[in-house]
Image (cartoon, grey):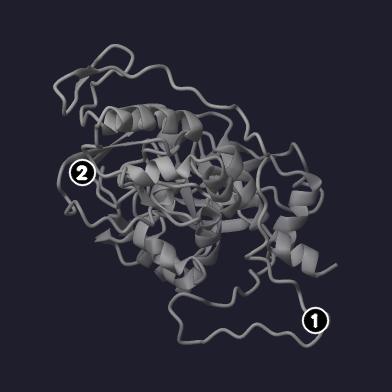
Amino acid sequence: DMGRAASLAQQALDAGLEPKMPLLVSPGSVQTRETLKDAGILPVFERLGATMLPNACGPCCGTWDRVDMPKGTPNSIITSYNWNVSGRLDSNQATNVFLASPELVIAKAFSRDLSFDPTTDMLPTPSGERFHFLPPTSDSLPSKGYLSSESAYAPPPANRDNISVKVDPSSIRLQNLLPFPPWPGHDFENCAILIKTAGKCTTDHITPAGPWFRYRGHLENISNNTLIGATNAENGKVNSIRNQLTKQDGQEVPATARHYKENAVPWVVIADHNYGEGSSREHAALQPRYLGGVAIIAKSCARILEANLEKQGLFALTFENEQDYDKIRAEDRISIKGLGEGEFVPGSTLRLVINGGEWEAALRHSFTEEQIGYFRSGSALNLMAGK
């Protein structure tokens, strides 16, 4: 892909053209960067005046400190990253993000026109001629193979018995991760519904990226963004729910979850289809678990997040009858039955009891025998640490 993009870029350079918009290039890793450099591909982008991003997470996960566009200003980006969730790349909800191949991104950079078709359209050159891109060419694989680099490798010390990891307790970015409590040994009773989400609820809605990523190593702080992008089915608003203990409306989701936790009230999320689609963001499972959540109950759940939830000792449950989603109200109290020894086994059906028995719903789970061990121990890490 990068070779073909460089082929188009070189054609434009030979014709005297320059990009008409800022161009960012993200090699992604030291190995890829060194391989592209050795193949003569990176120098082509450098001659374009492209900004070379470091070998780390960048705009793709929202850690782009964009300075050329004020927040709230409508604009468009064309990118070959793989996500175009609103506000993800530059934390600007007014940015329209269009996904394309690296070749199309380069071609459109010279036109500044999203409708430009490099297979048919032409561009004026400084000499007054008309330029037309030829089909790009490139080797499918690097002729010398992928270059390796161990410049970032630090070998472990020979004696590791006395090693301890010290974290400044006043740090806002780092915090020791304490073990989650194990399963209490009984059914979950009288749980509050933190939020009933409506429509799409991706990992970006559950734990937005951007400036929040500075807290990735501090679970307490990053939990302050939990579900702030989810739409409340009760009022159509984002990050605005009713605290069922205080009866106050317009409360933020993370603060309400903390309030329930402080008052020993377990809570669940009721969700729509494909809850947690998107990138495999571990915090989308860690944060609800940390804030006292016990289950995500959805019409359907994205596969990776489902596994992550189960790994952290959280239930990922789906309605046997999707219409039960519509019957549940945000003020309902629910219980999850069928967790006892011999009841909760692979393939079993759990019971959702509403308001002490007003009505019930059947819930499915995908726990294996090993994952049930995660649940009973409190998390996969707890189970492994106990062996």
In the rendered structure, are the residues bearing label 2 and label 1 in contact, judged by CB atoms less than 8 Å apart? no
Location of residue 294 with respect to 136 vertically, above or below? below
Q: Going by the image, does 75 lie left or right of 216?
A: left
Residue under circle 1? 160
330 relative to 183, above or below? above
* Disc 1 element: loop
- Write down the residue under mark 2: 94
**Dot 2 lies on which element?**
loop
First in sequence, mark 2 or 1: give its number.
2
Q: Nearer the viewer, residue 192 or 16?
A: 16
Residue at 33% across, 14% down: 119
Residue at 47% of width from left, 72% of height from top? Answer: 220
Q: For the residue marked with disc 1, what is the amino acid?
A: Arg
In the rendered image, residue 102, in percent from the top left (x then y), is placed at 42, 32
Indicate the position of residue 84 as horizontal and vertical percent values.
37, 38
Q: Residues within 10 Å of mark 1 (few under 14, many from 20)?
A: few
- For image coordinates 62% across by 42% down, the residue present is 351
**Hey, what amino acid is under mark 2?**
Ala
Q: Quadrant of the C terminus?
A: bottom right
Structural distance between the alpha carbons of marks 2 and 1 = 50 Å
User: Is residue 357 visible from the viewing direction of this image?
Assistant: no
Number of labels in the image equals 2
Residue 298 or residue 162, whichever sits in front: 162
